[in-house]
Amino acid sequence: MGGKRRGKSQPGRRRGGRGAFARAIGVGDLASYRGYAFAWFSEAATLLLANCSLEDLRNKGVGSVVPKLLQSLSAKMAARKGKTIDPKLVRPLPFAAKDPKDRMTLEFALQTLQGLVEGRRPGPLSPPSALSLDFAEFTRSSMGRGQLKRDAFRVGEDVLALSLVGAYLTRAYRARTEGGRWEYGYILVNVRSPALAAAMLDRMQAGVLGVTRRVVEGGGGFFPILVGAAAAIARALGGQLREVAKSPLLVEYLRLSKGEKVMAKGFDVFDVTGLATLLRRGGIAGTVYWLVRSFPKEEGYNNYRGFVQRLSEGLAKYHMYRRPEHLYAPLRALCSRDLQAEAVKLFGARWQGLSQRIQGGLSRLAGL
């Protein structure tokens, strides 16, 4: 994020007098605007629903990609177990007071994309705050004070629609921070491999969303998210991991913060190829996934939280430095009676098998 393409012409830049704008950015233009939030969300939609890139969207055209995308989205919404989804009520992105709230819903996105299929031409609009984060530097340096960034650029309704769908598919959580602001977390498994079926990409995405949501809701840190994501991917791929890992296994993590304004809190890209391979080699990908996925949200369970933190940090550092002492702390923690008591409350009789598998896997990796 952050406007990485300053060498290119700025999106929607004004021409002529005040109020005159260049043509709005449409879905066919998105490949030229990588690094902007609206392009990232849009590509999440095309990748997760149609296994296509922004270049495919430009080269193959809307008529080839969008119908497949809509079909996949309808099937995904219908498959939500026991959950009735009202698109009118789903607002995947945070919005500020002056944003077009009537156009921030999943219903608007579905109607706009269906209109594209039927040949309707989308209108231009000022991007909402969550999609104009990258323009702040340009407006400050080139337009002086008093100019609002959302008034300097135009995107098509089709771009907003794709962005909303991408946000819907990648949003892992909304959590209240200590400062009273809301944090919105979006995470994307960005893996491009000819050996990868769309259903497998969907399975990996669901697993990574699940572990991220649970860790954040339980107050966990960075390492459980990183290792939990790698475990979810390795668990989903199974024997396919070696072939798919010829391409990088990337996890992209965007965090937005909302108070009076919507602001970017962070954007990170993690290559979890080596970590996923390590977990697979140790035979503990599934076990680590369930240990992180069960991160408690309830009061108490501090020993279990501490164990998952030590386990995740140890595995990540062992992967980076290949020093077995990083695995000793989680191995010692497994002997704690307090941990055993809390884990049995969480897992019941399953804990004995989980603890034996994690102990065996860590011992193999450490060469014990």
Image: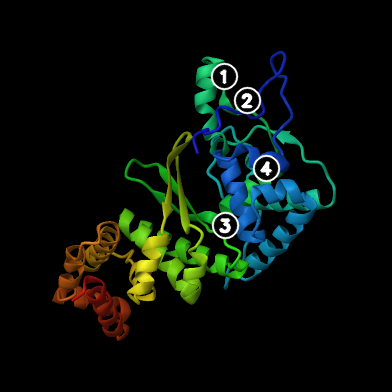
Report crowding for label 2: few under 14, some 14 to 19, many 20 or more residues within 10 A (C-alpha): some
Kindly identify which residue carries mark 4. Answer: 159
Say which amino acid is labelled 1: Gln
Kind of residue indicated by mark 4: Val
Label 2 residue SS: helix
In the rendered image, the quadrant that contains the C terminus is: bottom left
Asked if residue 90 can be seen in this view, the reply is no
- From the image, state whether disc 4 or disc 1 is nearer to you: 4
Query: Is 269 situated above or below 318?
Result: above
Residue occupying the point 71% across, 13% down: 17
Q: Which comes before the other along the chain, label 4 or label 1?
A: 1
Which of the 4 image quarters holds residue 47? bottom right
Dot 1 surroundings within 10 Å: few (below 14), some, or many (20 or more)?
few
User: Residue at point 26% right, 59% down?
Assistant: 313
Marks 1,2: beta carbons within 8 A: yes
Decide if residue 350 is on the left or right side of residue 331. right
Q: Residue at x 40, y 65 (%)?
A: 276
Q: CA distance from mark 2 to mark 3?
A: 28 Å
Quick one: label 3 or label 1, which is nearer the N terminus? 1
For the residues marked 4 and 1, what is the alpha-carbon distance in whole angstroms? Answer: 23 Å
The reply to whether dot 2 and dot 4 touch (C-beta < 8 Å) is: no
Where in the figure is residue 50, as x and y percent of width and height?
67, 60
Q: Which mark is residue 169?
A: 3
In the rendering, at what x and y percent does residue 336 appear?
Answer: 14, 74
Disc 4 is placed on an element classified as: helix
